[in-house]
Image (cartoon, rainbow, N blue to C red):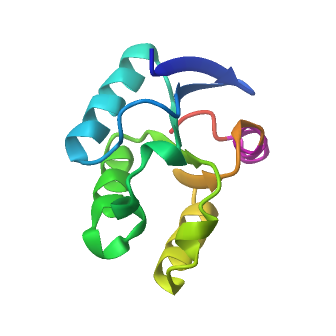
């Protein structure tokens, strides 16, 4: 199984396994959103390993398309892991990550502990 539902500080989070299929397009996002809704998740945590390099190249618009799908369905999206090598590519991605992390629906975090802490601090129980 590539996804499991976990209770993270009172929030149901669909945790994707690092070795699962990539989140490489809108349909992949919709499939994951459908699975999350079916399990009652309010957030989806996707390891960096599941995101293709194009996700981090903003000019491809892949990140925007995926993030928009999650926003449309009011489902939180957390990208888990180290994105340092991608941040070296330029300021656009750094700005995007900063803006996401200042918001309430899409976060880039190091691990589940950091995600749980943010959910607790912000009171974000739903998407």
Residue pictured at 62% horizontal, 19% vertical: 6
Q: Which residues are magenta?
A: 114-123
Q: Can you name the residue that lies furthest to the left here?
A: 27
User: Toward the viewer: 72 or 91?
Assistant: 91
Whether 82 is among the magenta residues is no
Whether 115 is among the magenta residues is yes
Q: Tell me residue 125's x, y (percent).
A: 62, 33
Q: Quadrant of the rendered structure where residue 123 is?
A: top right
Q: Tell me residue 84's x, y (percent).
A: 63, 67
Q: Can you name the residue that lies furthest to the bottom here?
A: 91
Q: 3 above or below 27?
A: above
Q: Tell me residue 86's x, y (percent).
A: 53, 69
Q: 16 above or below 127?
A: above
Residue pictured at 30% horizontal, 26% vertical: 34
Residue pictured at 58% horizontal, 54% vertical: 107
Relative horizontal placement of residue 51, taking residue 7 as reference (left or right): left
């Amino acid at each position: 199984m590539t996804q499991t539902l976990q209770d993270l500080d009172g929030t149901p989070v669909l945790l994707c396994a690092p070795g699962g299929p990539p989140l490489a397009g809108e349909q992949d996002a919709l499939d994951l959103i459908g699975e999350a809704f079916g399990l009652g998740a309010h957030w989806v945590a996707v390891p960096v390993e599941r995101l293709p390099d194009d996700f981090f190249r903003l000019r491809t618009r892949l990140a925007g398309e995926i993030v928009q799908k999650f926003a449309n369905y009011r489902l939180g999206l957390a990208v888990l892991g180290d994105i340092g090598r991608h941040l070296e590519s330029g300021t656009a991605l750094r700005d995007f990550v900063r803006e996401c992390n200042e918001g309430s629906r899409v976060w880039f975090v190091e691990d589940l502990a950091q995600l749980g802490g943010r959910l607790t601090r912000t009171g974000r129980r739903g998407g």
